[in-house]
Amino acid sequence: MRGRGSRISRATVWGSGVALAAVLGLTAYVALTGGDHDGPVTGQGSSTASPSPSVSPGASSQAPAPPAATSTYSIPANWTEPARWAALPRGSQTAASGNTTGFPNTTDGAVALLVAATATNMQNQRGMLDEQLAIYNTYLAAADQNPANEAKLREKASQTDAQNRADLGLPASGPLPSGAFVRANVVGFKVIQSSPSEVTAYLLTKVSSKAGEMSPENDSYVVSALGAVWQDTDWKLSVKASSDAVAQTRGQQSPTIAAPGDARFNEAGWTAIRQAS
């Protein structure tokens, strides 16, 4: 979390395209710096010059989404302890990609999968294509893996890398400078619906970026609705389940964007995440 009173941009991502957000780059998550300028795009999205995230319909047949909203807010000076904490379970196995798999067939197990499938870290020589291919091969449901989707992933990941570098003022190619990064990590969640075979949830993702060792860090918070299905003894990120999440929340206001430590985090019903031992 940034220092007290710092201004952090926030964006709410809605729509059918979010079904493939963590993998295929069909939803743009824009991290605004200082609330006034375009910033880096996380691995979940395609590049855009708009200050509001744009949403594309995705690979499956889905309805278009309402526009997203972008604004800023200041973290309160006083810390308010999150009222709800979850120690999400670790996976019991490690895939060839190095990502954790083998989550238990519980609601928390499904959320743990969604958290893992949303995390990205662009730094050093590792770009968003590396991150997205690992997520695609490890976490996306088999029904959603096909040559067309992989081609879209590769194209959008390249665009995202280029946009991130441009927004951070970095060279167009080569390893990132020491201390430069773009990271996305889930810091809160709110379950929408849960069953033994499908879990849908809101995710509150913190997107952090930095242009180098001596550069300031900029943070954004993004709300998305995603879903997981139980498949072949593990949870998988699913286009259908994520579409279900969007349908289940259509017409509803998404939870307020507020960082852990803000009283509004509790008022919105978010659960903070504590790493299980």
Image: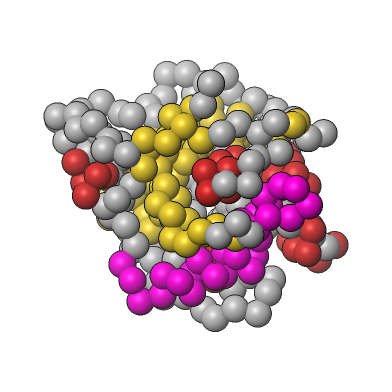
Residue under the point 24% across and 44% down: 266
Query: Left or right of 55: which side holds 72?
Result: left
User: Most extreme residue toward the right, as rendered?
Assistant: 147
Q: Position of residue 255 (x, y in %)?
A: 32, 57
In this rendering, the count of numbered labels is 0
Q: Is residue 247 magenta?
A: yes
Q: Nearer the viewer, residue 16 or 87?
A: 87
Q: In the image, what residue occupies the spot 58% across and 43% down?
A: 109
Bounds of the magenta span? 228-253
Relative depth, front residue between 68 and 160: 68
Relative to 43, does residue 99 appear above or below in the rendering? Answer: above
Residue 48 is at least partly visible in this image: no
Residue 116 position by quadrant:
top right
Quadrant that contains the N terminus? top left
Left or right: 60, with 28 as reference point? right
- Residue 238 appears at what percent x and percent y? 66, 60
